[in-house]
Image: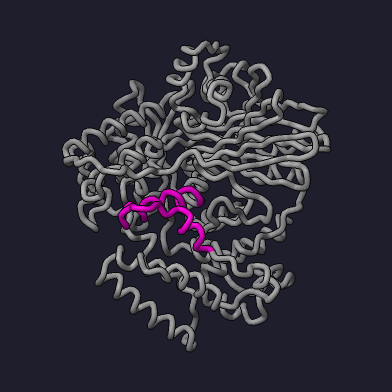
Amino acid sequence: MCGILFAVSVHHAFDREVFEAARDRMVHRGPDAAGAVYFRGDQVALGHRRLSIIDLSEAANQPMRLGHIWVTFNGEIYNYRALRKELEAVGCRFATQSDTEVLLHGYRVWGGELCSRLVGMFAFAIWNEATGEGLLGRDHVGQKPLFYAQVGDTFAAASEIKALTALLGPVFPLRHAALLDTNFYDYVPDPYTWYEGILSVEAGHYLRVVLDADRLRVQSYRYWCFAPPLEPAPIVTGAALDILRTQVRECVESHLVADVEVGALLSGGTDSNCVVGEAAALTAKRINTFSIGFGSLDGDELPKAREAASLFGTEHHEHVVTEEAFQQSVGSVLDTFDQPFFDTSLVPMGEVSRLAAESVKVVLTGDGGDEVFGGYNYGWYRSPFLEPRVSDGLSRQAIRELIESAWERAYYLIAGSGAWASRPNFLKRRASRLRTLRLFADDVATAIGEYDPKWAFEAHQIQGLDPFRQAQWLGIKLPLVSKMLVKVDRCTMAHSLESRAPFLSPQLIQSILDLPSEVTNPSSNWFKGLFRQSLVGRLPDSVLTGKKRGFSTPKRWRPIDGIGGEASLNLCLQRNLLSASAMARIERLPKLHWKLMQINEAMKLGLF
């Protein structure tokens, strides 16, 4: 797990001191070693910060070379041993035991097909000095970040935005359309960010960068997407259970491969319990587990986590987060994420990462279990109960919206999610309602223009999927990629801790989504039905039937005590981001106020 930086310019040489300082803005992602290489009169540069996990020798440091091919790589390739054997069979000779070297030989043999052969979490930049071409790849579901930007004839990509802005300069203004994104989704969907001009390489995609004598060409390619079977084979529950149990065990086993100790995050839910149980069975040594609680508040999962730790015989560690510590920690959001991020569970995630980093360098997590196994109320992502509550007071517009919303919800409950979600106007309605707020100044509204945030829903529709599977796929491609995994990566790496999610293997995702939904989720309120059946007799009933909680903070906790007042939004007002009448309305919308406060703080720090 590392931090990477890649840059190429048609006409300008990079200042080595500036480049390496930008690379070192990510020292938390890789405190163990640093490297940089330069080509073509310093017009091409690769930088790397290393967190040593596999092959701890200096020979595995990066950037790594194979002839005229170089790579800087962040992540883990879990099938690297199998790929190595395949490459050795065609004559490749390896100098290290690292998974990084597999990328070099793999690129030489397979070229652009490399990404589709990898199983893991990865973001890498390969530079072919002989051809003047680069390949930048990101893993199937976006566990590892890779941002990029082009300013004039200069292109750069990095694991974190702060490295890009340190190299290219603060030339990226606030992307006003993000204001609509975050009130429609509660996050900014890939490939966009809060910055105009900074994008994310999309999950399951790679970029091809070609440097000619007088121009730079950048093209994006998709190499992975869920492909529904043309004719699903009939399967009974017993056979499906056998497949699931085998695949989950194989995924956990592959994620245990490391030359350092591997621990696990443990809550009271089925996902982390399953991962810890499998890991404990596959490991001779007692594994370290880590949990976070919130004192004596209702819903604290520490007792369940202790029960699981005792059941699996782990070396258990725990920490209690107080409301005061929670409120103080929220101020570090921009340091960790480089842009506004609204999920307050980032605080306990950061605390459990800090706790784990005191003992281990790698932790397994249950991330992705709900999305992959159907752990939500589908169509959760497509139902009227997701309608953003944007109206305020008892204005004529507010009353009209309440009546309309009540009708849509009644239709959903009577006709079902499939019929309701197929109505062509439901997303259009949600987008248009955001505009009725009239919170933003005229110039901002003009800048946003006709931008429609529902594009992301439409971009990830797959022809022929049943409503349940379609909603499940949207859950994987939208909030998982752009919110959940962002939180986990940034919080763990802020403490130089690698997190691994066995449930996010692309083969497991494809296998489970291939199964009929009546097998995986036999009733509308039996979430993760097949997955829970696979754990009967292996986990306590209290875990299998318990309410989902995870590391979420208590609902009564507020991000900032005493939120309010113009002072909290002074720059938003001074820079004419908000309309003259906005403040009175925002005071009645605390969640929106919290979002705008982060934007205001970003302006104070000079990020926008």
Name the spot of residue 13 as percent of width and height, x first: 83, 34
Q: How is the image coloured?
A: one colour
Viewport quadrant of the N terminus: top right
Q: How many labels does the image show?
A: 0
Q: In which quarter of the image is residue 468?
A: bottom left
Residue 558 coordinates in the image, percent (x, y)? 49, 64
Magenta span contains residue 464: yes
Q: Quadrant of residue 70?
A: top right
User: In this orientation, does residue 317 appear?
Assistant: no
Principal SS element in the magenta part? helix
Residue at the extreme front: 230
Q: Residue 246 placed where, x, y %?
A: 27, 30
Residues in magenta, as a range = 453-482
436 to the left or right of 462 = right
Name the residue: 55% across, 31% down.
Answer: 112
Give the camera-side residue of 597 and 533: 533
The C terminus appears in which quarter of the rendering?
bottom right
Report x, y in % for residue 56: 56, 19
Horizontally, residue 398 falls left or right of residue 146, namely: left
Q: In this view, does 65 lie to the left or right of 478?
A: right
Name the residue rendered at 62%, 78% in the picture. Answer: 582
Q: In which quarter of the image is residue 158?
A: top right
The residue lying at 45 percent from left, 53 percent from top is 460
* Residue 211 in view in this figure: yes
